Amino acid sequence: MAAGRVHRTVHETEVAAPAGVVYGLIADPVQWPLYFPPNVYVERLEFDGVNERLRMWATANGQVKTWSSRRVLDAAARRIEFRQEVPAAPLSAMTGTWIVEPLGTERSRLTLLHDFSVEGDRAEDVEWVERATDTNSRAELANLAKLGEGWGRLDDLVMSFEDRVDVDAPPELVYSFLERAERWPELLPHVSRLELTEDLPGVQVMAMDTLTADGSAHTTESVRVCFPAAGRIVYKQTRTPALMSAHTGAWTVTGGAYGSTVVSRHGVVLRAEAVTAVLGPSADLAAARRYVREALGRNSTATMTYAKQHAESALAR
């Protein structure tokens, strides 16, 4: 760790799940945006089964931060050590450890340690990091404990799916339509309001009102990370409709000069306790899965269809 005073935070919780299940949740960082409220997107850059390198985007004290981390996974000890390569300001260094301990066959203790330093050890920066670390760690552990309690039905609560549309236009035109979402209320009939800010290049914060098939409106808030060179936009809803506790997604555009394909992919964690309140007393998780698949797929396909029309019309001019 870089020179300077080292500050430590310790957070722990008990989880009503076997230690192996809990370790599995923290060992798969690609799924963290679904499992951890602060995480927006995690890209795995390297992995050999033990050593791992990640690029991460997450919210901290209301801001979007990005950094790269290296992790060392010890599955036998159920322990993961991590170190930020280039810490996000005001950090000058950040390391930490995840530790899972069995408390019998069906219960575990999960501990999260952070050691950090800030440039100049300024009190206001230390307080900022401590507040962000405490808020995020509490949110992460609380959600892991909730997921762990229902680990036997995680396969029913977590779902992913995708839709695709072929376009007779180059991918750059399609991508531009998706990236410039501030124009959507004028171009998409199911979007009635959209506010977008982009304080960091390629990182967009959105608030959107979407109309459903029955005419009701849903307000969602999202963080999007744009990768123009890759033709990809990933996002995490930070305010979700009642039926979902987490929702992530990605738009991916591929192709060449004579045509392209746009794919919309969704990841969802259902909120089991909201199913009957939203869908009626006889509804179950299977009904909720069908409802979410249809609703999200319908809106995504509509957006991709309008992107297709926009791109093809622009090419014909």
Image (cartoon, rainbow, N blue to C red):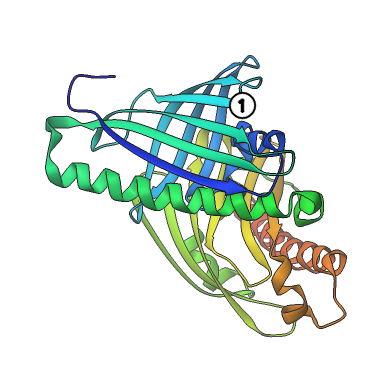
Q: Residue furthest front?
A: 104
Q: Which residue is mark 1?
A: 78
Q: Is residue 149 above or below residue 109?
A: below
Q: Residue at x 74, y 60 (%)?
A: 301
- Residue 19 in view of the camera: yes
Q: Is residue 2 above or below residue 215?
A: above
Q: Residue at x 63, y 14 (%)?
A: 48
Q: Residue at x 85, y 76 (%)?
A: 283
Judge left or right: residue 281 versus residue 23.
Answer: right
Element under label 1? Answer: loop
- Residue 51, x across and y down, in percent: 56, 16
Quadrant in which the C terminus is drawn: bottom right
- Circle 1 packing at 10 Å, graded few (<14), some (14-19), many (20+), is many
State the residue in front, 209 or 110: 110
Q: Residue at x 41, y 34 (%)?
A: 113
- Residue 47, x across and y down, in percent: 61, 18
Q: Type of residue at label 1? A: Arg
State the residue in front, 144 or 183: 144
- Residue 317 in view of the camera: no
- Residue 220, x across and y down, in percent: 54, 68
Quarter-wise, where is residue 120 in the image? top left
- Residue 277, x across and y down, in percent: 72, 81
Q: Is residue 135 above or below residue 10?
A: below
